[in-house]
Image (spheres, helix red, strand yellow):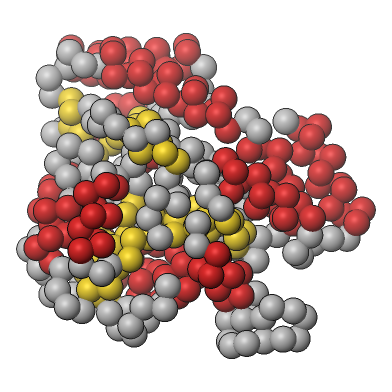
Amino acid sequence: MKNDIDRVIFDVIDKTEFINGSYVKSFEYDFSEYQDAKYCVGVGNGTDALEIAIEALGLPANSEILVPANSFIASSEAVTRSGHKVVFCDVNEDDLTISLNSVKKLVNVNTSAIIAVHLYGHPCDMDPLLEFAKQNNLRVIEDCAQAHGALYKGRKVGAIGDIGTFSFYPGKNLGAFGDAGAIVTNDEQLAKMCRMIANHGRTEKYAHQFEGRNSRLDNIQAAILGVKLKYLNEFTETRIKIADKYLAELSDINTITLPTRQKWATQVYHLFVIRVGDRDKLNEFLNKNGVQTGIHYPVSLPKLEAYKHFESNNETVVAEHAATKLLSLPVGEHLNEEEVCRVIKLIRAFYER
Ligand SMILES: *Cc1c(COP(=O)(O)O)cnc(C)c1O
């Protein structure tokens, strides 16, 4: 990709077209096509995308928004920063995405929305969630920061609910060369509102309708993303191939719980997360042998220092318990087969000792 990326970066510089440039427009178009959404609004990062999406929905001030307890803090941070109250709910024991049972227990008259995080690249079970949301007059925001291209029953995530948000942080499945994000929706009004919020509440240069903020997608980032988007399907196929290899070759180790892939899901494996009782020991062993791992996430959101003032609703036991066992194995388009085999061999060696 290097030549193409170099070329577009120099083109942006040649044109001195850094803000609201032509690459932003064409990337927004290409990404909306890619995600099967009518509209796409480029923004500064995935956290801003969530904040702006929530704000654009115009929910009653200080209303409750349900957030799954196993996610990155951005999912809950955005709720508080947009003037609402975070209510943590639990995740499913199998796929670790938002639990509808838990949602049902926590909904009350003050609840206005649900954040469905397609965690690790695995889509949430959207149909029953949307059905419940409709019955209870709730809006559904899809946090797709880890799920570019993921499919729920053959449909791309993002515009299945009311509005969806993406991050192009360099480590995501589609990564920029810095911070970047996007919002997708099929609702024209919502898209318009997001664009205005992200650009100082204006429609034209000095026509400010209200106070917004500044969170625009850089033209250089958009140009790079436009090049990389063409490779995303290929990258995703590599991720799935690696995941299939792990699933096949680690399935006989009883002490490992492998990630669940629901029948209706095309998971894009932003992360390949196993659960093991002796997580810290296995982790240390892999690291010592040159295999970089991660833990997503070592502490469930309600247990973070940031939320110590929250009264526990005792509702997030699955997430809390999972946090002690989660271990993310290497996955990504940069890995070759030999490297994946090496990880598998090391894990087998650890358990055969
Ligand atoms: C990365 C991530 C975000 C935040 O995206 P940034 O671009 O880093 O702000 C939000 N939600 C989830 C689930 C993420 O993984």
Residue 150 position (above or below residue 162): above
Residue 323 can be seen, yes or no: no
Q: Residue at x 28, y 13 (%)?
A: 248
Rendered location of residue 63, percent (x, y): 27, 79
**Above or below: residue 238 compared with residue 232:** above
The image quarter containing residue 72 is bottom left
Q: Is residue 127 above or below residue 151?
A: below
Residue under the point 34% across and 85% down: 61
Q: Tell me where residue 68 appears, x and y as whole percent.
A: 25, 57
Front residue of 235 and 100: 100
Q: Quadrant of the C terminus?
A: top left
Point 37% across, 55% down: residue: 161
List the single residue furthest toward the right.
14
Q: Report the side of 257 relative to 213 (left or right).
A: left
Q: Which of the two residues, 272 or 56, is positioned nearer the viewer here?
A: 56
Residue 120 image point, x, y percent: 36, 41
Residue 40 appears in the figure:
yes
Q: Quadrant of the N terminus?
A: top right
How many marks can you see?
A: 0
Residue 172's spot in the image, x, y percent? 50, 43
Quadrant of residue 6 within the rendered picture:
top right
Which of 161 and 272 lies nearest the eye of the viewer? 161
Name the residue: 32% across, 78% down.
84
Q: Does residue 214 appear to the left or right of 97 in the view shown?
A: right
Q: Is residue 14 left or right of residue 87?
A: right
Q: Is residue 98 left or right of residue 27?
A: left
